[in-house]
Every structure is written in C-alpha cells, then in structure tokens.
C-alpha cells in the first residue's frame, strides 16, 4: 500500500513539474535567451561617457531623443560619465545620473538627466554612451542628486 501511495505521489509531482515547464517555456522571461543580440546590460552602460552634440547650444538644431546613432559623432565633446540609470517603480528607464565637472573625482557633481534629453549610442559591441542636447555648463547648473537626494 505504501508503494502505491508513493508511486501516485511521484506521478502527481512529475505531472505538475511538466505542466510548470510548459508554462515556463511560454513565459516572456524564457524568450530573453532568444533575444541575446538585441539586449543591453546596465553594466555595459554605466561608466560610459556622456557627450554633447551641441557644445554652445547656439546652432538651433531640434533635439530628438529617439534618433538612433551608430557611433560617436565627430563634433561631439565628452562632458561627463554615466554614473547610474534611474528606473521608475514600475521598472521603466526614466533617466540617467551623470557625473559632470571636476577633475579626478574632485569637485564633480551628479545630476539627473531625463530620457527625453539623452539618446543611447553604441560605441562598439560591448560599450555604450549617451549623447545629450545639454552642454557641460548647463548640466553643472542643474540641481545635484547626491546620496541624500534618494533618501
């Protein structure tokens, strides 16, 4: 009798596991592996450079954050570093934290830049940068977002 009960329980568990595997195979999370070449990890972005496409902002060119760049532009100036990514509570990227100004981490400043004001740029297959319409002086004039800002 114990053998029949143990066998029945084992069959029930195996059937449940097979059903769970079918559900897992159909989940959005399981499809990520097939998207490998189209995905970017945050560690490939943080630490990257921030460029300005308009040093003086006097050219009057319209800004479009949806523009896709295939590399760093010739006239762009490096003005900072990507310190962090800012996500909303529902997981959407809403901005970046930029480290601007200073020298060798002395007197630098961290500011938040909205995704509407930056565009992601693939530097190569493994590293990324952002370009913004703001120049360095405009970023340095923004309110800082040091550690106290997040508390």
Image (cartoon, helix red, strand yellow):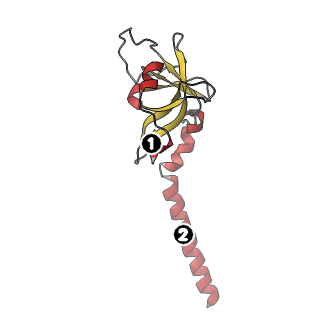
Q: Residue at x 46, y 13 (%)?
A: 55
Residue 60 figure quarter: top left
Which part of the image, by quadrant, shows the N terminus?
bottom right
Earlier in the chain: of badge 2 and badge 1, it is 2
> Up-down: is 87 above or below 109?
below
Q: Residue at x 57, y 79 (%)?
A: 9
Mark number for residue 140? none
> Up-down: is 133 above or below 20?
above
**65 vs 144, nearest the viewer:** 144
**Disc 1 target residue:** 149
| Secondary structure type for disc 2 | helix
Tell me how many marks there are. Answer: 2
Residue 51 location (% of width, % of height):
51, 20
**65 vs 111, nearest the viewer:** 111
User: Can you name the residue that lies furthest to the front here?
Assistant: 107
Q: Is residue 66 left or right of residue 26?
A: left
User: Can you name the residue that lies furthest to the bottom here?
Assistant: 1
Residue 50 location (% of width, % of height):
52, 24
How packed is label 1: few (under 14 Cα within 10 Å), some, or many (20 or more)?
Answer: few
How packed is label 2: few (under 14 Cα within 10 Å), some, or many (20 or more)?
Answer: few
Residue 40 figure quarter: top right
Closer mark to the observer between disc 2 and disc 1: 1
| Secondary structure type for disc 1 | helix
Q: CA distance from mark 2 to mark 1?
A: 51 Å
Q: Residue at x 48, y 52 (%)?
A: 26
**6 vs 102, nearest the viewer:** 102
> Up-down: is 19 above or below 13?
above
Residue 110 location (% of width, % of height):
50, 33
**Disc 2 target residue:** 15
Residue 82 figure quarter: top right
């Amino acid at each position: 009798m114990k053998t029949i009960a143990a066998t029945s329980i084992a069959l029930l568990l195996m059937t449940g596991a097979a059903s769970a595997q079918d559900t897992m195979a159909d989940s959005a999370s399981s499809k990520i592996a097939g998207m490998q070449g189209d995905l970017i990890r945050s560690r490939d972005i943080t630490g990257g450079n921030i460029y300005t496409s308009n040093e003086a902002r006097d050219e009057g060119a319209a800004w479009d954050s949806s523009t896709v760049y295939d590399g760093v532009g010739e006239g762009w100036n490096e003005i900072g570093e990507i310190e962090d990514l800012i996500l909303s509570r529902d997981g959407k990227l809403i901005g970046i934290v930029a480290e601007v100004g200073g020298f060798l981490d002395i007197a630098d400043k961290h500011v938040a830049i909205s995704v509407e004001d930056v565009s992601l740029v693939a530097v190569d297959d493994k590293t990324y940068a952002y370009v913004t319409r703001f120049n360095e002086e405009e970023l340095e004039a923004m309110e800082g977002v040091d550690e106290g800002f997040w508390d």
